[in-house]
Image (cartoon, rainbow, N blue to C red):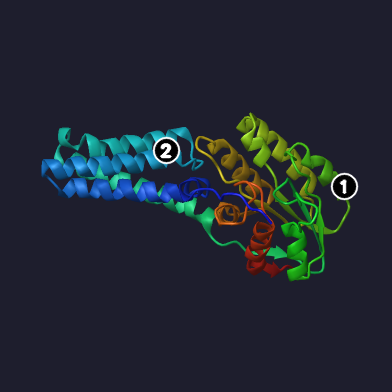
Amino acid sequence: MKTGPEMSQVVILFANGMVFFIGLGCTVVASLLRALVKQSLAVSVIRIFGIFGAILVILSSAPFPIWVYAVWFALFTGTLLCSGVFPRGTRITLLICFCILSAVLCLSEVRYHFTPSLAIPRHKQLCVIGDSLSAPIRRDDHAWPDVLAGISGVTVMNLAVPGNTTKGALDEAKTIRGIDCSVLIEIGGNDLLGDMSADAFSRQLQTLLKEVCVPGRYVAMFELPLPMFKNGFSRAQRSLAMRYGVQLIPKRYMTKVLGTPGCTTDGLHFSQAGHDLMARSLLPIMTEGH
């Protein structure tokens, strides 16, 4: 089967959120070095290194409020770029505050990158609500929900519809009313790539989760890989997942497939190898629910 180019590794680093940690590390290292180094040429190199890291952090789409970014950047500026205008005691205070805030941001974000545990009951049907990434595009393809059913022993109902949006997925969600099942949601990519605002996405996702998240039903959802300046989409997913008790699947599961050679047909849609890889990636994190 013909396959297309995979996403570049630079794009993958932004999409899976790892660029945030790289940038944060660069800024902290630069700030610490600036406090120790006095030679002018070395200071210039350190500043360039730190500015590069700050740019990565700002472009990373980590879903922190604007005021958090503003405070963080103000401290960064004080420790790295304007340290010469402050007395030594003030410089030390700024450096400590910057390092503490950076550590807090790192710990706050890293918890969304931990390997999850999908407590999907083996005796219940698993319903997948998704778009073209979960649906077979070609007639002879087997989409990853069907592959997962074959290798896990779980009965899977694949309700994914190519081109589906969060609003459209509500129709599929209504078809499983009253069914004793678990639900796996892979939706929002078409909203993200379109002209939808983060607020509109949040409202539609909340409507979908209200329909799906009924008492006694286990629900998991793929977190969307994000392009730059799309923080609001991640903020909506995370806050609503917490509100409705939905298990988030880290972005790296999706970007792993998108970035693996031969796993996409056009850099975005899965080839059969991509569907197979996604199913194999999910199998180890599926645990027997109770």
Q: 209 left or right of 80?
A: right
User: How far, Cα to Cα, is label 1 from label 2?
Assistant: 41 Å
Q: Is residue 230 above or below residue 257?
A: above
Image point 57% across, 49% down: which residue?
A: 5
Disc 2 marks a residue whose amino acid type is Ile
Quarter of the view holding residue 164: top right
Q: 260 left or right of 85?
A: right
Residue 258 visible in the snapshot: yes
Q: Position of residue 252 (x, y in %)?
A: 55, 55
Image point 72% across, 51% down: which residue?
A: 134
Q: Tag 1, which secondary structure?
A: loop
Q: Position of residue 68 (x, y in %)?
A: 43, 37
- Pick the front one: 10 or 129: 10
Say which quadrant the N terminus sits in.
Answer: bottom right
Disc 1 marks a residue whose amino acid type is Thr
Q: What residue does disc 2 label? A: 58
Residue 202's label in the rendered image is none
Image point 68% across, 69% down: which residue?
A: 287
Q: Is residue 125 above or below residue 74?
A: below
Image point 17% across, 42% down: which residue?
A: 43
Q: What residue does disc 1 label? A: 175
